[in-house]
Image (cartoon, grey):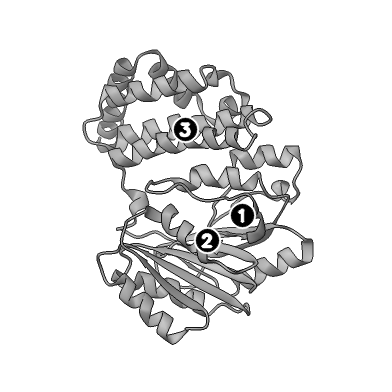
Amino acid sequence: MKLSIIVPVYNMAGDNKLRYCLDSLVNQTIADYEIIAVDDASTDESFKIMKEYEARYPWKFKAVQTFENRRQGGARNIGLSMAKGNWVGFVDSDDWVAYDMYEKLVKKAEETGADVVGCDYNMTDKQSMEVGKVVPNNTMEQTGVLDFERYRMLVMNPGSMVIKIYRRNVIEENNLRFPEKTFYEDNCASPIWMLHFTHFEKVDEPLYYYYQHDTSTVHEISMEKCEDRLMMGKRLIEESRKYGFYKPFRKELEFAFTKLYFMNTFYSYMLGVKNPQVSFLELMRKGMKEEFPDFEKNSYYQEAFDEEQKKMAHLLMKSPSRFKVYFKSLYTYRKLFKKL
């Protein structure tokens, strides 16, 4: 079999989200492929819909149900354990893809000998095949036979996993899987996965549709999600040590960890969580001091963040309580200024 498409599903029956996603998959132009849709203990009609598709397309659609919510990573792992295709792709169940996406990605792989191939995606707020806001994913400088310089770039910017296909034998030979029961599993898995492949190519087209809707969980910030970011940051470093990637890519991993564990998290926490606590800010500070105490000297960090962001980070590392007061005062002032 040429391709396995794995779709984790959780409560996507409403607003035609799941059907629109699955319609784009059952109508792919590539021949000889399978769709493995894994229901992650949904409480709505998602599995019923999946069974309808399995009945209509039994030769290429498998509906799998788990009664334990293992989150997206766990559902993907179930799909990987069942996959038979030479290539594996992942699609989120509220998104969809161009009808020829997988044909184009596999063709690129066959033409170039690549073992991982990606494309760009576009963001849209309506269910249609009309291209929305195009978001380039990965750069052409990252493509080709992967050498040390390309790996360095991919550690810091591995790109989305849902817009790629991966050669399955590499996945299985290295026992690559996703963290389970957590948010942000891709932030840990994506860079580690890319370091196992040897040749990356890209179709320079927006073939994946990333659906921006009001109920999308990516827009919701919770304490649990902030805690999961910290956990995935630590897991990234653990995995890099496990596979022997830590020493050669320490500087790049320091930047990736700083961005995920610290910079992105404290902004999300302060702006999205009600009543942010100094104790959580202190936890982040402690984690940075334990893992990368000199992160502020990292040249990637210096280039990537502006002066205000670096000032905020420095203040947080000095005093979480003072940082909280400063941050709240600054954003309160900016809100008032906008109203005037």
Q: Which residue is mark 1?
A: 171
Q: Nearer the viewer, mark 2 or mark 3?
A: 2
Q: Nearer the viewer, mark 3 or mark 1?
A: 1
Q: Residue 47's quadrant in the figure? A: bottom left
Position of residue 34 relative to residue 263, above or below, is: below
The residues bearing labels 1 and 2 have C-alpha atoms spaced at a distance of: 9 Å
Mark 2 element type: helix
Name the N-terminal-most of marks 3 and 1.
Answer: 1
Name the N-terminal-most of marks 1 and 2.
Answer: 2
In front of the other: 244 or 270: 244
- Disc 1 and disc 2 in contact, CB within 8 angstroms: yes
The residues bearing labels 2 and 3 have C-alpha atoms spaced at a distance of: 24 Å
Position of residue 113 relative to residue 146, above or below, is: below
Q: Quadrant of the C terminus?
A: top left
**Side of 129 relative to 9 (left or right):** right
Instruction: Indicate the amino acid at tag 1.
Output: Ile
Numbered-mark total: 3
